[in-house]
Amino acid sequence: MNNRMSLQTREWVRSAFLELLDEVEDIKSITISDVSKRSGISRRTFYRYYASKEDILTEYIDILIEQYGNDLRSKKLANFKEFIVYFFNYWGHYDHELFILQKNGLFTYVLSEFNKMIPELYATISAPWHIQKEVNSREIIYTTRYGVGGLWNVYGEWLEFDREKIEITEVAKILIQSFNSL
């Protein structure tokens, strides 16, 4: 019971935080009192779970990335083009939440957290386009940073400028067409 209540409280705080971020243009204008009040808990309870607003953000992003990794592990993608389609379709489900982070200047947190988790994720996913495991770990880091950075930058561009104009699947098609022309 206690663990379930703890998970529920954390969910209330994350949801309240995202709602507040959606209403403002700067994370600095949100107080811990605002988050506590919106989530229906006391400040004291808030501090049992989090040390700061940034901790909420980090936890939220880590949960998204963990869910992404779990989903990706269950897929049998035949090639990198299928991965591109999968990547944009998957994250397209979170466009509203990620747009909220972006409009508050927090989208770089997503990339930063993704970069921390990518080595573990890479090691647990078998994909035909992966470089051999025997390759120097620095090569894997450079390769994954290149891919992740590129995909997240394209996704961020779509969020900021084209989210209301074109479907995310069109972005995947654009990238695939550019790869085909190489």
Image (cartoon, helix red, strand yellow):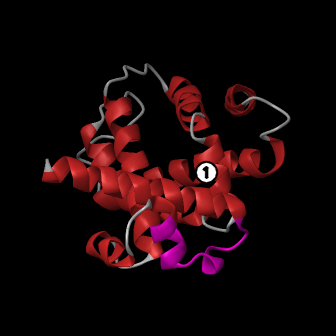
Q: Residue furthest toward the left?
A: 1
Q: Give the camera-side residue of 173 and 103.
A: 103
Residue type for callout 1 = Leu
Q: Position of residue 31 (x, y in %)?
A: 55, 79
Q: Is residue 156 above or below residue 50?
A: above
Q: Position of residue 110 (x, y in %)?
A: 52, 58
Q: Position of residue 24 (x, y in %)?
A: 71, 67
Q: Is residue 65 above or below residue 51?
A: above
Quadrant assignment for the C terminus: top right
**Would you say residue 11 is visible in this rendering?**
yes
Q: Position of residue 150 (x, y in %)?
A: 61, 50
Quadrant of residue 75 in the image?
A: top left
Q: Residue furthest toward the right?
A: 165
Which residue, given by chain and number where applicable, does mark 1 sit on?
A: 98
Is the residue marked by circle 1 packed among few (<14), some (14-19), or many (20+) residues within 10 Å? many
Q: Give the camera-side residue of 46 and 80.
A: 46
142 sits to left or right of 173: left
108 sits to left or right of 128: right
**Of helix, strand and loop, which mostly describes the magenta segment?**
helix
Q: Give the camera-side residue of 71 and 146.
A: 71
Report if residue 32 lies within the magenta region: yes
Quadrant of residue 124 in the image?
A: top left
Q: Which residues are magenta?
A: 24-37
Quadrant of residue 133 in the image?
A: top left
**Would you say residue 114 is visible in this rendering?**
no
Residue drawn 33% across the image and 56% down it? 9
Residue drawn 40% across the image and 71% down it? 55
Tag 1, which secondary structure? helix
Residue drawn 48% across the image and 65% down it? 112
128 sits to left or right of 165: left
Residue drawn 32% across the image and 46% down it? 121
Tally of numbered tags: 1
